[in-house]
Amino acid sequence: MNIRSLALAPVLALAMAFPALADKIPLNEISRYLNAMKTAQADFTQVNADGTISTGVVYIHRPNRVRFEYNGSKTLVLASAGQVAVYDSKSRSGPQQYPLSKTPLSLILAPNINLSQARMVTGYTEKKNTTVVTAQDPQHPEYGNIQMVFTANPTQLRQWVVKDDTGKRTTVILGEMKTGVSIPPSKFAIR
């Protein structure tokens, strides 16, 4: 071993003692992960635009279906058959309904997700060993956007923040996500 190698040894040992910054997960890997997710279930914590916090269970059945069951209330949010229905236990007029295509959530529920599509991704960064992707409908950016947070090895969706067409933000933090779960179709029936 030469003197130069011996001199570099402490520098190399020091460099190896600190974890390397994680590389961003490639967009094609994130698209592949989302497209491969057919069903999933997870506990969630939701931080609403007004600062209140809700918890519950989310069920995802791609494409185009999601169900948010909220703990301690009869509030329910369903997306199915191209519609989002919000059942509020305080309302007596039935659910409020919106077209799914006009919400940023439609981007992760779409039948075929391609984050490499022109003008879809508006932000793509690495933060604290996570990859953060902000996406919007390229044809309708006025519908808002969704910021998704992923961890690597294996790729997993951990959180999303929906910014709606009025600028309000709703954050959903996911617990351990179970994929490939059996979810009865009746869970997504809008009545």
Image: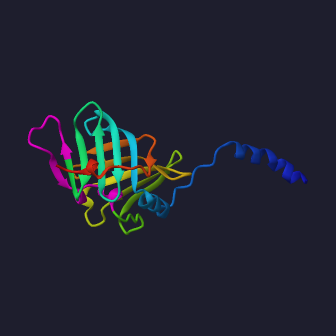
Q: Can residue 109 be seen in this view?
A: yes
Q: Residue furthest left?
A: 93
Image point (44%, 57%), residue name: 124
Identify the residue at horizontal 63%, vertical 48% (top origin). Answer: 20
Viewer-closest of 185 and 153:
185
Relative to 83, 108 lies left or right: right
Which residue is more in the foreground, 32 or 129? Answer: 32
Image coords of residue 161 (percent x, y)? 35, 47
Magenta span of residues: 86-110
In this view, 86 is above or below 52: below
Q: Is residue 77 above or below residue 122?
A: above
The residue lying toward the viewer, choosing from 85 and 119, is 85
Picture residue at 8% right of the left edge, 42% below the top:
93
Q: Position of residue 142 (x, y in %)?
A: 24, 59
Residue 99 included in the magenta stretch of the image:
yes
Query: In screen coordinates, is 98 left or right of 159?
Result: left
Q: Going by the picture, which residue comes out furthest to the bottom? A: 118
